[in-house]
Amino acid sequence: MATSAYLRAANQPPPLEGYDLFSQDAALVEALRREGDAAREEECAAFGRLCGGEPLELGRLANEHTPALRAFDRFGERIDEVEFHPAWHELMRIGVEGGVHAAPWADPERAPHVARAARFMTLAYAEAGVGCPLSMTYSVIPALRADPGFTAEWEPGLTARAYEPGLRPPADKAGLLSGMALTERQGGSDVRANETRADPLAGGGYALTGEKWFCSAPMCDVFLVLAYAPGGLTCFVLPRVLPDGSRNGLHLRRLKDKLGNRSNASAEIELEGAWATRLGDEGRGVATIIEMVAHTRLDCVLGSTALMRRAVAEATHHAAHRVVFGRLLAEQPLHLNVLADLCLDSEAATATALRLARAVDEDDRPFRRLATAVAKYWICKRTPPLVAEALECIGGNGYVEESVLPRLYRESPVNSLWEGSGSVNALDLLRAAAKEPESVEALLREIDLARGGDARLDSASDRLREELADPAEIEYRARRIVELAALCLHASLLVRHAPHEVADAFGATRLGADGGRAYGTLPTGVDCAAIVERHRPQLER
Ligand SMILES: Cc1cc2nc3c(=O)[nH]c(=O)nc-3n(C[C@H](O)[C@H](O)[C@H](O)COP(=O)(O)OP(=O)(O)OC[C@H]3O[C@@H](n4cnc5c(N)ncnc54)[C@H](O)[C@@H]3O)c2cc1C
């Protein structure tokens, strides 16, 4: 008996799952070889195979069964805990055992940060929510290194590849996680508006009193917290559980009901005489914690790049299997134009993200200083429109939860908000340029490595120099400048390293005058099919 068309999965693509997320991303593989170490390819591929399997389903589960606050136990005692679905714990375990958290800091092999960046992106492709605690744990290490005492106390637990959920004294746990609490109700970008107080204690340490309006991953073992000590705004190390096993005075008021990032818990917290020790000098809180923020900003870039990659993978895969008006979407010129346009931004983001990660391996501070602000601003800004267009590429199914695109779409604005939102990063570029002019030189030097390779890039980078040198209304012009800097950096990397058709189309549309304002406006003559084929996961290979 013939199967009814109603019962068949008519004209639907096979599910995009069960494949090596790393090796099927040509731009990422090439970037790892270039910026890191080809010897680490197999380790990344093994992680890519792992993440392309069960974690795709775990991500769905962790987002459907969102974390719940358990403020009190049945006897009415405060416990301030968050309960997660097992899928969350499994994803966290995969991340920690894969060294996506702080493991690179203890890794003596070459280029651990580039390889870790590739793994972070691979895991974020499967599920972005766990990226938050994994990133904060990664980023706290360089800040803690300001004090050898903290390094000795915390680094072994934070870098261990062991995931141990639950609130217990740090010394009793094989692996630890870190969070941060800066933002208050009256000010997030402007942390100097903080009101949390830190009173010195006679027996050593400080008692912290106040509230924090956003504190993500509140089940972490330790937090960096900003509070006002007698000498000014200061950075503190605050353990969740005290060495004697009692809970510190950190209470969870409620969990945020967020647009996206729903597998992850973000809390409003109260600090009620919470015991903490000082990191860095009193009054140097921002300078101390900025070391952590510099690394979480890198992860915002990686996280957004991963969202772009997944959206592009889903859209190109769909087009290769869906017939519309008698032809595959992947053979229709206008749809190819849309897909190729999306691929250009995904490829540019990937090249830039791993170049930035190399700067961590090389401890290249001047380059990182400016390039982080530039890349974070633009890549995170570019992600929501890219994901929205990819969603449309899948048609009505793209608007339905099962396609994953709605989840990507809800997640897509968060990296721009976190860790210095768009304009704050744009202004940070100006601050860096004024205070550390060597960072401007380092960025321009990198862009100039492609000089002569594309006349459009040459004239754009000349324009960038002029914009940076012109002080008139510079604050007002900050977004124009940071956008131009990002496009120049992207183009320079693509001219040097990407296939000609990618670099040329990027230059024509992002730096020349031959592009439109929506995706799908590439000029004629672009080899869209080749660009799309490069970015399409090849399940049949
Ligand atoms: C899901 C989520 C999780 C979070 N987790 C944490 C966490 O774990 N720990 C933590 O400390 N914080 C956390 N935050 C808070 C986040 O870092 C802040 O929301 C962010 O820094 C912005 O601060 P704000 O909300 O006070 O906005 P504001 O500072 O009031 O900014 C509002 C707008 O003004 C713009 N702006 C600010 N200054 C200027 C200026 N000088 N010129 C032009 N424009 C300007 C900003 O770009 C923004 O668009 C989280 C936020 C979210 C959404």
Image (cartoon, rainbow, N blue to C red):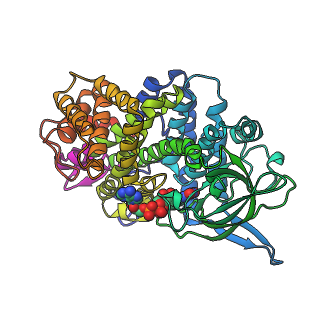
Residue 402 appears in the figure: no
Rendered position, 39 above or below 12? above
Rendered position, 528 above or below 261? above
Left or right: 416 as drawn, with respect to 41: left
**Residue lying at 16% horizontally and 27% vertically, measured from the top left:** 455
Left or right: 223 as drawn, with respect to 391: right
User: Where in the figure is residue 263, as x and y percent of width and height?
Assistant: 57, 60
Residue toward you, 132 or 193:
193
User: Where in the figure is residue 239, as x and y percent of width and height?
Assistant: 74, 53
Quadrant occupied by the N terminus: bottom left
Quadrant occupied by the C terminus: top left
Rendered position, 319 above or below 26? below
**Residue lying at 59% horizontally and 46% vertically, measured from the top left:** 284
How many numbered marks, from 0 up? 0
Residue 212 appears in the figure: yes
User: Where in the figure is residue 476, as x and y percent of width and height?
Assistant: 27, 53
Q: Is residue 338 magenta?
A: yes
Q: Is residue 76 magenta?
A: no
User: Where in the figure is residue 116, as x and y percent of width and height?
Assistant: 55, 35
Name, please, the residue furthest toward the right: 244
Residue toward you, 255 or 12:
255
Q: Which residues are magenta?
A: 318-341
Rendered position, 509 above or below 34? below
Left or right: 394 as drawn, with respect to 116: left
**Residue lying at 29% horizontally and 46% vertically, measured from the top left:** 342
